[in-house]
């Protein structure tokens, strides 16, 4: 399962990179964007942008 997930992320990152004109030196950026998108899809979000994380709460 982990290998399948990594392959999906890799393919998505490649597509994002290619669509942006194949800029150099930004591999990690594209990997993280792709990872967030795939994980959101798997979580049922289906959106291409990850949900905004909740701010940590402080005890009262």
Image: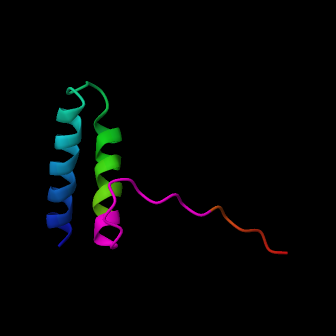
Q: Residue at x 36, y 68 (%)?
A: 45
- State the image quarter where residue 4 is shown: bottom left
Colour mapping: rainbow
- Counting from the top left corner in percent of width and height, residue 36 is at 35, 56
- State the image quarter where residue 23 is shown: top left
Residue 51 belongs to magenta span? yes
- Counting from the top left corner in percent of width and height, residue 57 is at 72, 68
The answer to whether residue 3 is left or right of residue 51 is left
Residue furthest right in the image: 60
- State the image quarter where residue 1 is shown: bottom left
Classify 45 as above or below 49.
Answer: below
Q: Residue at x 22, y 54 (%)?
A: 9
Q: Residue at x 34, y 47 (%)?
A: 33
The answer to whether residue 6 is left or right of residue 52 is left
Q: Quadrant of the C terminus?
A: bottom right
Q: Residue at x 52, y 57 (%)?
A: 52
Classify 23 as above or below 42.
Answer: above
Is most of the magenta stretch helix, strand or loop? Answer: loop
The answer to whether residue 17 is left or right of residue 55 is left
What span is colored magenta in the figure? 40-54
Q: Nearer the viewer, residue 21 or 1?
A: 21
Classify 23 as above or below 48.
Answer: above
- Counting from the top left corner in percent of width and height, residue 35 is at 31, 55
The answer to whether residue 51 is left or right of residue 59 is left
Q: Nearer the viewer, residue 40 or 2?
A: 40
Disc count in the image? 0
């Amino acid at each position: 399962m982990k290998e399948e997930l990594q392959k999906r992320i890799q393919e998505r990152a490649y597509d994002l990179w290619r669509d942006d004109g194949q800029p150099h030196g930004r591999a990690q950026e594209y990997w993280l964007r792709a990872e967030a998108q795939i994980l959101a899809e798997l979580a049922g979000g289906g959106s291409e942008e990850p949900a905004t994380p909740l701010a940590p709460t402080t005890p009262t």
